[in-house]
Amino acid sequence: IKEIYHIQFHSKTTTMAEKFDVDAPTLSRFVMKNTKDAELVILMNSLATSFKLISSAVGRAGVAQLYGLAGEVNSTGDDQKKLDVMSNDMMINALVNSGVCNILVSEENEDPIVVPKEKAGKYCVAFDPLDGSSNIDCNVSVGTIFSVYEKKDGTVDDLLRTGADCICAGYCCYSSACELVFTFNGGSVEGFCLDPTIGEFVHTRFDMKFPVDGGKRIYSCNEGNFIHWDQPIKDAVEAFKNGVGGKPYSARYVGSMVADIHRTLLYGGIYIYPADKKSPQGKLRCLYEGIPMALIIEQAGGIASTGYFNGKIGRVAELKPDAIHCKCPIIMGGPRDVGVVYDCYKKAGIETPSI
């Protein structure tokens, strides 16, 4: 009888295990296993908590009357949406009360946020709480971008460093699923999906890489700025449209950096937001958009270039921000497609890095 009971019990638990993951590979487990740093686990858990809150708010935006403007502008002069303000508060509250943060920088705050001494820790975090929020009222994908540095002097200068000093960078995309993609400096790019049944981010994408063959032929840019671009960028976009290797590229532009970069990383292609006559310093923020995305792109096997900027073509990750809200140009994608842009620069007589 005991033997029959054991067989039946084992059969039932096996069936249950097939329906439910009894050993879920969660975000906390991954961070602890790969870093053995309890404070970093706390930090990532605090970030994850804010992502869950933001995801819930985005999902209920229509029902909860969260669409529309909040009546203010942020640090860079953009009109703030109600969800911008709410997402910013969610992230600040989670990080300040984590006990492991020292200085915070948000796109929505003109000045850095200094964590009170009794709650201060060793990490400095810069973030865009709701990237692409201009699209939120029409239900388009939005996201959060963040970069993490270790405290040195306990001042805002701790964040004004190149990507070489960024210990962790990532983004969270709020769409049909809530996906977190991040990387530790020098490590692989990993993806986690929020499982609403257990309220945890579960490891679903492993060692993310650009497609070896370059993937889909997609170019992504705001062609409304075409007349302001320098000639090599115009030539590159025309090459994509007319066909590189005899096959024209498809145009895909969401207008939310997180959504456009996420698609580029998964499918292949190129994302372009260059410096131009209208925005000679570029349009995207260096500290919490350019550098974190550059780390992800490069560690996934792609190229994150500034294009022609400050007299040369360089890496976004090598830029040193001179202010917390300074801007930078971006050309990000796989080697095949960034190579097309570099070829156009070469034809214009501009020294170009090798791929």
Image (spheres, grey):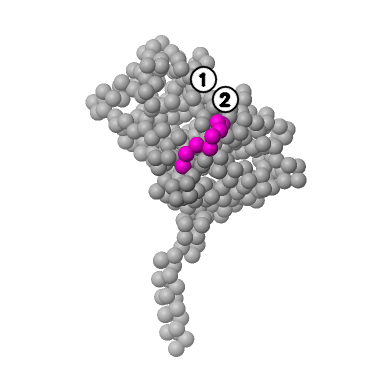
The numbered mark, 1 or 2, whose residue comes first in the sequence reads 1
Q: In which quarter of the image is residue 102?
A: top right
Percent position (x, y) of residue 286? 54, 28
Percent position (x, y) of residue 322? 62, 23
- In this picture, residue 99 sits left or right of residue 20: right
Q: Name the residue under label 2.
A: 326
Q: Mark 1 points at which residue?
A: 281
Question: How far apart are labels 1 and 2 at the CA level?
Answer: 8 Å
Q: Can I make out residue 335 in this image?
A: no
Q: Which sits in the foreground, 53 or 300?
A: 53
Percent position (x, y) of residue 41? 61, 50
Q: Magenta span covers which residues? A: 67-74
Are discs 1 and 2 less than 8 Å apart at CB?
Answer: yes
Mark 1 nearby-residue class (10 Å; few <14, some 14–19, many ≥20): some
Residue at left offset 43%, top offset 25%: 273
Q: Which residue lies furthest to the right in this view?
A: 118
